[in-house]
Image: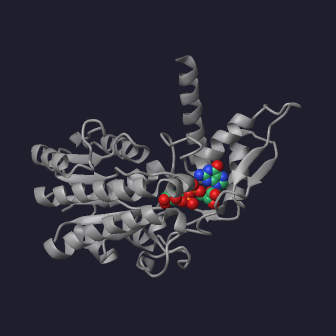
Amino acid sequence: MRLTSENAKIYVAGHRGMVGNAIWEHLSDAGYTNLVGRTSDELDLRDPHATRDFFAAEQPDFVVLAAARVGGILANDRYPADFIDDNLAIQQSVIRAAHNTGVDRLVFLGSTCIYPKHAPQPMPEDSLLTGPLEPTNQWYAVAKIAGHKLCEAFHRQHGDDMLTLMPTNLYGPGDDFDLETSHVLPALLRKAHAAKGTAPEGGDAPVTLWGSGTPKREFLYVEDLADAVRFVLEAPEEELRDAAPDGMLNVGVGEDLSINDLMALIQDVVGHEGPVEHDESKPDGTPRKLVDTSRMDALGWTAQTALRNGIEKTYDWYREQEALNVAR
Ligand code: GFB
């Protein structure tokens, strides 16, 4: 059932993460006043009993499942058990509790890494499970596929209104800038910023990029994803099911670029003029993952933020955090 009342109780699972926080702020700005959130210290969503008790006490009308263990290519490769185990556990407790409580609609956030490594480009939703996954993130991908299938199964067997959004690579304020665990965009922003004016001979030190720089990625600003989540919460169920009979909707911008081109754009925004080096011992991952956005296009939703503009806002946020940390 669609979201129509500003007083409806909306539970945003993972509201302290980059994605959940952007969704919370966006819904709040749109006039939704009855938002519920719990930090992971207050509620461990991997615990089905605690999650069930929380749902029974709060009785949310709507759920946005943005809680997940996420990370860049290296973190996915290094911590396979955490990525599959935590995500499966979180999804199962939350989706089951939402079913038992009888929520009006649940929106689950997947990821475009669920598609086969060599899926046709742009990747349509029905390329799911048509080929082998990218090995570096197969653990996370299998968990996210299972989360979507759980939603699809509850819809098929019980008629539950549960949908999965598949956002492409996300970035924005609140992102993880830790170079070991982060995704490429915040990592390159941080590295380019740190290299400015630090060459021993003067000028900018080199920035080291992982892999060949030839893989292509599509980047979605996190506030655009938050807007897509609100749009889907508010959309009539028949329209959503007509567009997405399997309950899956890709969310992207319709354009990608190589990691080398991303580096050049980031250098331009940051004002870094030093050389770029490559650490070829690090993995490239999937060669390309541009999503087919026809379903969201047909529903009438498009992303608004140009990549350069989104990078500028993210860089502003990063420098503010840096200034705050220095002041502390
Ligand atoms: O963003 P990223 O870590 O994840 O890497 P994926 C994208 C590309 O950027 C890869 C290259 O080819 C990396 O080798 N890259 C270059 C870098 N320099 C860097 C750097 O300094 N840091 C990082 N992190 N990458 C993730 C999945 O895949 O995408 C997750 O592992 C999830 O499960 C997420 O799906 C959206 O796009 O390759």
Give the image location of residue 6, x and y in percent: 21, 46
Q: Residue furthest top?
A: 327
Q: Residue at x 78, y 49 (%)?
A: 276
Q: Is residue 5 left or right of residue 204?
A: left
Give the image location of residue 291, x and y in percent: 51, 69
Report the colour scheme: one colour
Give the image location of residue 43, x and y in percent: 24, 41
On the question of residue 190 being in view, the answer is: yes
Q: Is residue 65 left or right of residue 303?
A: left
Query: Toward the viewer: 110 or 208?
Result: 208
Please state, as top left, top right, bottom left or bottom right, where the N terminus lies in the image: bottom left
Q: Residue at x 39, y 61 (%)?
A: 110
Q: Residue at x 84, y 34 (%)?
A: 203
Give the image location of residue 17, x and y in percent: 40, 43
Query: Toward the viewer: 229 or 38?
Result: 38
Tally of marks: 0
Q: Is residue 283 left or right of residue 293?
A: right
Q: Quadrant of residue 101?
A: bottom left
Q: Residue furthest right?
A: 201
Q: Is residue 269 above or below residue 255?
A: above
Q: Quadrant of residue 155?
A: bottom left
